[in-house]
Amino acid sequence: MSVRIFVPRDSSAASVGAAAVCRAIEDEAARRGLAVDLVRNGSRGLYWLEPFVEVEVSGQRIAYGPVTPDDVPGLFDAGWLEGGAHALFQGPSEAIPYLEKQTRLTFARMGLGDPLSFDDYRAGGGLAGLRRALDLAPADIVAEIDASGLRGRGGAGFPTAIKWRTVLNAGGGQKYIVCNADEGDSGTFSDRMLMEGDPYCLIEGMVIAGLAVGADTGYIYLRSEYPDAWEILENAIVIANREGLLGDDLLGSGKRFELNLFKGAGAYVCGEETSLLESIEGKRGLVRAKPPLPALQGLFGLPTVVNNVITLGSVPWILANGGAAYQAHGMNRSRGTLPFQLAGNLKCTGLVEAPFGVTLRELLYDYGGGSASGRPIRAVQVGGPLGAFVPAADFDLPLDYEAFTAAGATVGHGGIVAFDDTVDMARMARYAMHFCAVESCGKCTPCRVGSVRGVELLDAMLDARSGGANDDTLLRDLCQTMLEGSLCAMGGMTPYPVLSALNHYPEDFGLAPKREEKVA
């Protein structure tokens, strides 16, 4: 009887040689005359252990990692097919503290099986949410989302039910569901992981959204830099049509939903919902003025729901288990869980799904294991390249939309990038301004011109800081103009990292410490 061995096909594992590990396992097993069944699963999210290889022993998965091709003969010698001890032995996967302490709702199936196996998806509870949704009236589906407290996981944290109800009440006619899969923030990878590791979850969420608002057509706008996710989604859509998750007769209900995969234009600003819609329409990715809102005049001028991958991926669990069950997790107005992504200078980088209310300190030290360099963590950027820098003094701040806003920061997409005490925060601030200058769509003056002037001001401050005579008044005035005058979050959020760096680390700019100012 063959032994099942799981090797992730996720692009994170692939980047560190998972395919070569697979070949080495197959070759070594054949040389020894042993029968093995290799399963290419999604990543479990323990990135510091990739390639993270699991062996199924008596119904339990035993983990080894990080495994290289050179390690494979020794693993066989150690009897790993029976769970034998080895230097790379990590024990039963589910007992690894990093996994054991998580609350995986959206990512409940992540890494458990072949992402394209529809049988695995069904066996893991897939389709339960859709089956329930098919028995509900559209308004009742929206009511469940409302009861859950689900807010947009793309960064803004806008209540999902309000957006859906607006589209539902927009009248009859053609409507659209658009998934924003243009994940471009540094330190973020949860969207990619879900698409590569559990694509039917995203598809099911989009279908339920369509039933809720009266839309029968959807688009996934996928960033062009995700070829592995493209391949998996492309195949998943074909299989989903064959299995009745998509098509003209959803699970025999007579209802229909068509899904299209659209490759992004490669611009960071296309992660903004109206720029994304322009791109799908074949235009240059420029931000639209609001109003009108996309919920009323979105794709091709018609009512459109635009949600990101994790928002839509959370929907099947909510419908299957009820809005109240989701609402039971989290704190205040931040309900449910968020897949936090740990990156940067940490020992244990990867994905942690936890309820809102977990603190940065818990994520950085209980999960992340502290800095990889062994030096003190000085700053953490939360929410991507336009997120504020949070100092060590605020590491006990709970991950909560309102708590972070009050502190002049953002939760954003849940990306957390750590820096030790060797970081130059003035140069990090300059990077944020330069990023905005490069990625701006150019439609509004505060973003287009302000970012370029900001780079110039920061360059002058970097040149003069050794003399200790810098003045940040003009830079702060410029940031305030960008905050208040930019058309979208591209220019409107660029001041967050700049002002937070100025406020918390003035010495890096050659400035005397001054009273902290909250980001407006």
Image (spheres, rainbow, N blue to C red):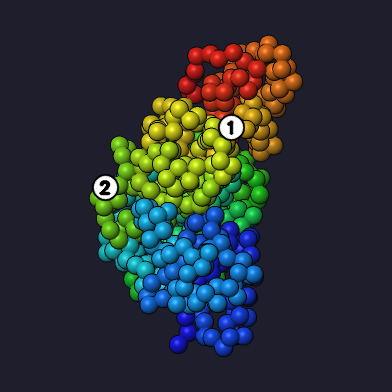
- Residue under circle 2? 328
Task: For mark 1, give the secondary structure.
Answer: loop
**Residue carrying label 1:** 421
Q: Residue at x 50, y 29 (%)?
A: 391
Front residue (pair 303, 55): 55
Q: Tell me the mark number nearer the camera, choosing from 1 and 2.
A: 1
Residue ID at (39%, 38%): 359
Q: Secondary structure at mark 2?
A: loop
Percent x, y of residue 40: 53, 71
Other residues around mark 1 within 10 Å, as few (<14) / some (14–19) / many (≥20):
few
Dot 2 surroundings within 10 Å: few (below 14), some, or many (20 or more)? some
Q: Nearer the N terminus, badge 1 or badge 2?
A: 2
Q: Considering only vertical position in the picture, is 408 above or below 42?
A: above
Compared to residue 388, the image places residue 31 above or below, namely below
Q: Pinpoint residue 401: horizontal percent, then vertical percent.
A: 40, 36
* 188 or 100: nearer the viewer: 100
